Image (cartoon, grey):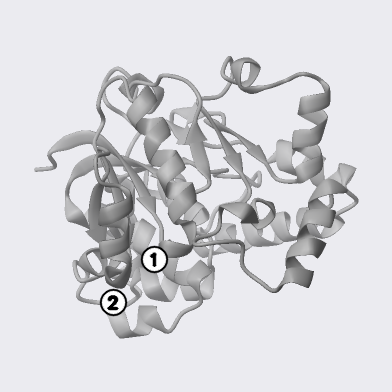
Amino acid sequence: MPQHPIVLYCKSYKGDLKRTKRLVLSIDKYNTDNIPFYVSVPKADLPLFFTELDGTTAKLISDEEIIKKNPHISQEEVDLLHGNFSQQIVKSEFWRLNLSDAYLCLDSDSVFIRPFTTELFLSFDSTPYTVIDEGREILDIALYSRKISVLDNFYRESRQFQKIFGRVGRCYSFGPNPLIWSRLVWESLEKEYLIPNSLSFYDAVLSAPIDANWYGEALLKYKAIPLLPCQPLFKVYHYAWQMDRDIRAKIRLPELAKLYAGVIYQSTWEREMDWPNEQGNWSSRLARRLRRRLGRI
């Protein structure tokens, strides 16, 4: 029996230590209900995180502890994957620790900006809300930026998952982060799809590497929990020019907090937060800063 109705969870690593610490401090400040918060990192990074997060409420565990809960996934195989693939596997296997019925899956570049309670994530009967819409916000931004490939990829990927689950109809987005995930939905994916097809989530991610779509389409297909739609919980700055536009319009954190519980600053253009310092040689760092100033990343 899980210990909690919901916990907060972040998968991180040493390169994101500063971002993770910023997230932890924001949780310590605004976590009104004292919802437990877990951070997982590679075992080799644990000593650094224990030192830097000492005195906070974050509970540290290793990624390896999560992976070993699934006998059908090899840690050696996960270690060989690109980080984008391996982190999806770790995050999507967190439910196996049996700590909670649901978890809010956060990225390191997230930060809370106002007080929050369990009611933000769960309905009165403890059913998790599901972030779902048709992706118009990011698709509008892509149109504005003349990035038509973003639209093409969105519809191509969505239809790939529709084909996997035999669903027809509208294309849905199950993001952006953070995402509220139910243990029951992940269990239904395993029992109804993965096991009958002799697959693990490792195999699933290799074939279609979008964990949010695996979760969302499994929920629509197997209906392990009622679908209670909600809009994104955090304001996501996909490009630097979005943030510049809000600043010029004098839309800052107090204004954003009326609609959102937090903000996500993309780590690709917030590289000064890298641990221990901004990565790359001096020329690449200068070029990134110039692109940020021009609003191109």
Q: Measured along the vertical axis of the image, is residue 34 above or below residue 212?
A: above
Q: Is residue 37 above or below residue 147?
A: above
In the rendered structure, are the residues bearing label 2 and label 1 in contact, judged by CB atoms less than 8 Å apart?
Answer: yes
| Secondary element at image label 1 | helix
**Label 1 Cα crowd, 10 Å radius (few <14 / some 14-19 / many 20+):** many
Residue placed most toward the observer, 251 or 6: 251
Q: Is residue 200 left or right of residue 243?
A: left
- Above or below, 206 against 242 in this view is below
Number of the label disc, if any, that sits on residue 89: 1
Dividing the picture into quadrants, the one containing residue 192 is bottom left
Residue at 49% x, 71% y is 83
Q: Which residue is mark 2?
A: 73
Q: Position of residue 74 (x, y in %)?
A: 28, 81
Specify whether residue 107 is in view: no
Report the quarter where the N terminus lies: top left
Can residue 222 be seen here? yes
Name the residue: 39% across, 35% down.
25
The residues tagged by marks 2 and 1 sit, at their Cα atoms, a distance apart of 9 Å
Amino acid on which the number 2 mark rests in the picture: Ile
Q: Residue at x 41, y 19 (%)?
A: 115
Few, some or many residues within 10 Å of mark 2 (<14, 14–19, 20+): some
Identify the disc placed on residue 103.
Answer: none
